Image: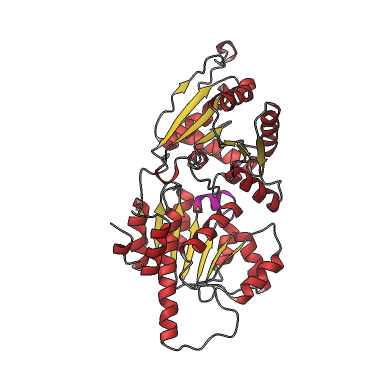
Amino acid sequence: MSFSSMGLAADLVTVLSELGYEIPTPVQVETIPAILAGHDVMAGAQTGTGKTAAFALPILNQLKAQKLSDKAQMEPVNKEVKSVRALILTPTRELALQVHQSFVKYGKLSGLDSAIVYGGVSIDAQSDVLKAGVDILVATPGRLLDHLRRGSLTLNQLAFLVFDEADRMLDMGFKDEIDAILKQVPKQRQTLLFSATFDDAVFGLSKALLKEPKLIEVGKRNAAAGKVEQRVYAVDADRKTELLCHLLLTEKWQQVLIFSRKKLGADKIASALLNAGVKAMAFHGDLSQSAREKVLQQFKLGEIQVLVATDVAARGLDVESLAVVVNYEFPFIAEDYVHRIGRTGRAGNSGIAITLYSEEDALLLEEVEAVLDTRLPQQWLAGFEPDLTKSTSDVRRNNKSAQKQRARRRATGSKKARR
């Protein structure tokens, strides 16, 4: 199947050809026709499989067709604030930037106006853009509500509502904001929900949002990307940094994304790497928006070899051909492991995901294996073998009830600390 055979307009096909997009990815093959046919969609696919294009292309196609139809009918121009026709909600600023860039790139011949709003930057400058009128808006939930309360825009003519990374949005506690936004959008709309993982919370949200949706799943649910080689190195906790430095200095990888659970941990790891002669920077929520954008740009340009990030970067950070991801420790939420390693092996490329495992990570490892429905064999690296005399055996079973109890304790006790 080709993009032209899917019913996309000629200008979109032309842009895709210029970008080197030849064959649609599996999620695009399944999703684009469903959206063009007017169906609500609940789609699950691994990051890096082209799911942004899967909803951006049909939305651009339909909005342009509607705009041409309105002109043909000589409809009067609305002198008031132009209502947004498509709203894409994302959980993080980084993902919002990525999605907006995709709409700009794909829609350069469409004649449609797009904008982006998120926190951490001037709200007045954003208001000026919105009051001038936009067709497509990419937003984080909190800042969108700020603009709605200020009267910067209206959603009463919204045709498309998209939830990108819906599971992450719920995990970050945006349910109240979502409910408030839903009160201001028309009931007659097309709603699209995209998520890398599905759980009870996501299915619960889908029931409130979607009408007779098409359920689209590409690949095994909650599975890691197929071309990512997963390695788990067993090492004593107090030697993780030493092993990390050894890998970075001997393997000579050009770009490496390292995940730490906490902001303080990210700072300490970045500092240790700098002392070892590795160009590294920390990336987390304590940095200003301008500082985060600068660090990301330096990393993408190769001016920084290593980015040490908290899970704020697990979604939305898109670095072309990123070859290596390192989990300094397992995430508290098992599904986040999938999102972390999904930063590599994107768009059909191969990648390596390395996890540094110590005895204290045993339960978290089991939870990740339960989500993946596969074992992650541990290996030792010569010179960094764990000291087995210090190991302690934990015989607690990792049954579903125990997993849920631990997840509830972590969710209520340390959510903010993880960001």
Estimate the x, y position of residue 163 in percent, counting from the top left: 49, 59
Numbered range of the magenta stretch: 167-174
Residue located at (38% from left, 59% from top): 17
Above/below status of 98 relative to 304:
below
Compared to residue 164, the image places residue 355 above or below, namely above
Where in the figure is residue 416, as x and y percent of width and height? 66, 44
Quadrant of the rendering where the N terminus is positioned: bottom left
Please give left or right for residue 11 compared with residue 251 in the image: left
In the image, residue 232 sits, relative to residue 335, either above or below, namely above
Magenta run includes residue 280: no
Residue at x 46%, y 69% (from the top left corner): 109
Q: Main secondary structure of the magenta part?
A: helix
Q: Is residue 279 left or right of residue 95?
A: right
Answer with the quarter of the image where residue 183 lies.
bottom right
Q: What residue lies at 50% left-to-right and 52% top-to-bottom? A: 165
Q: Is residue 9 visible?
A: no
Asked whether the viewer can see residue 228, the reply is: yes
Q: Residue at x 67, y 49 (%)?
A: 294
